[in-house]
Image: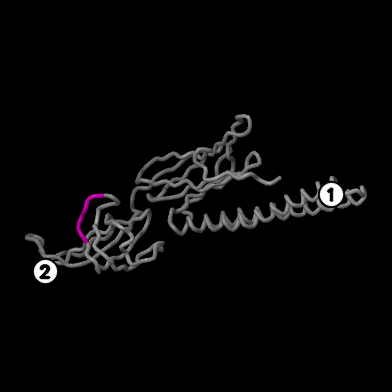
Amino acid sequence: MRSRRMIPTASLALLALASLALPSATPPGQQQATLSRVADLTSAPDGERLGLLLAGAQVAVLETRDGWSRVAIEGWMRAEAGWGEPGPPAAAPATASAAPARLSGTIFLTGRKGKGLVGSGIAVRLVRDTPESRDALQQSRATCSATTDALIAEIDALQKQAETMLSKSKDATAAFQGYDAALKAKADKLKELAAADRACMTGLDAAADGHAALRTASATDGTFSFDGVVPGRYLLHAWMDADDARHEWDVPLAVEPAAAMRLDLTEANRTRAIQLPR
């Protein structure tokens, strides 16, 4: 009599991603793949060897990151004594059933001349750390940069045009008229840039909201907290404008069951800081 035994899927990792017959950037979610060559099966990336998969073996790709794939396989093997007939398959433990955690922190920056700046009333989002969420945030920032960079270049060109009118024109009246016209055009472009910047940040917030597990706002002293956080991988997302600069955070973190975690948002872990146009 043969008994079927499914190899646990939660801890399997496949060595050498290049051996999978898949594109190099594998979309998330389960996909069927065929191995093109022999590959080791390990308990984790660089972990204990569990077995050997032969070329042509079929696997389900559950996740790909950092050059490793977590896979699931199903097949048959010779039963060992005492196994008997298998019972109903055990349900996989749901991540949401794990004991929730708590995350807290403070938004704090050091401003000009060492002055402390707290992030009061700042929207803070706990974004699920997935390829989709990272792509959404990256794409939103790239779109914004393309728009605002072009406007900033136009503004710089108008400023130079104004300066040139005063320095090179021999007709004083024409010089001042050209100077005023260039400054007016610059002022209009600055308004256009401000509107584009607001639209950009609205789009970035929407991208974060599309993948957010929890949302909150910091208190007047810059503190924030999340209760009932389901264990998993997240990005702590926030941004604030201070001292003519924009500070942005997408800080990765792994939340363990029943953990009480603290993560402050400061200069040390910000994703980027950009100078705001004046």
Other residues around mark 2 within 10 Å, as few (<14) / some (14–19) / many (≥20) = few
Question: Is 49 in the magenta?
Answer: yes
Apparent side of residue 36 relative to residue 251 in the rendered image (left or right): left
Task: Give the quadrant of the N terminus.
Answer: bottom left
Magenta residues (range): 47-52
Q: Looking at the image, which is closer to me, 262 or 109?
A: 109
Task: Give the quadrant of the C terminus.
Answer: top right
Residue 190 seen in the figure: no
Question: x and y percent of residue 148 in the render?
Answer: 65, 54
Tell me the SS state at disc 2. Answer: loop
Residue identifier under label 1: 165
Q: Amino acid at mark 1?
A: Met
Question: Is 4 in the magenta?
Answer: no
Question: x and y percent of residue 101 in the render?
Answer: 39, 45
Question: x and y percent of residue 243 in the render?
Answer: 65, 38
Which of the two discs, 1 and 2, labels the residue nearer the N terminus? 2
Task: Give how far apart the Cα atoms at labels 1 and 2 are.
Answer: 91 Å
- Check the image and report above or below for 218 versus 17: above
Q: Amino acid at mark 2?
A: Arg
Apparent side of residue 177 relative to residue 83 in the rendered image (left or right): right
Quarter of the view holding residue 119: top right
Residue found 72% across the figure and 50% down from its top: 156
Mark drawn on residue 2: 2
Residue found 30% across the figure and 65% down from its top: 60
Q: Looking at the image, which is closer to me, 78 or 37?
A: 37
Tell me the SS state at disc 1. Answer: helix
Q: Nearer the viewer, mark 1 or mark 2?
A: 1
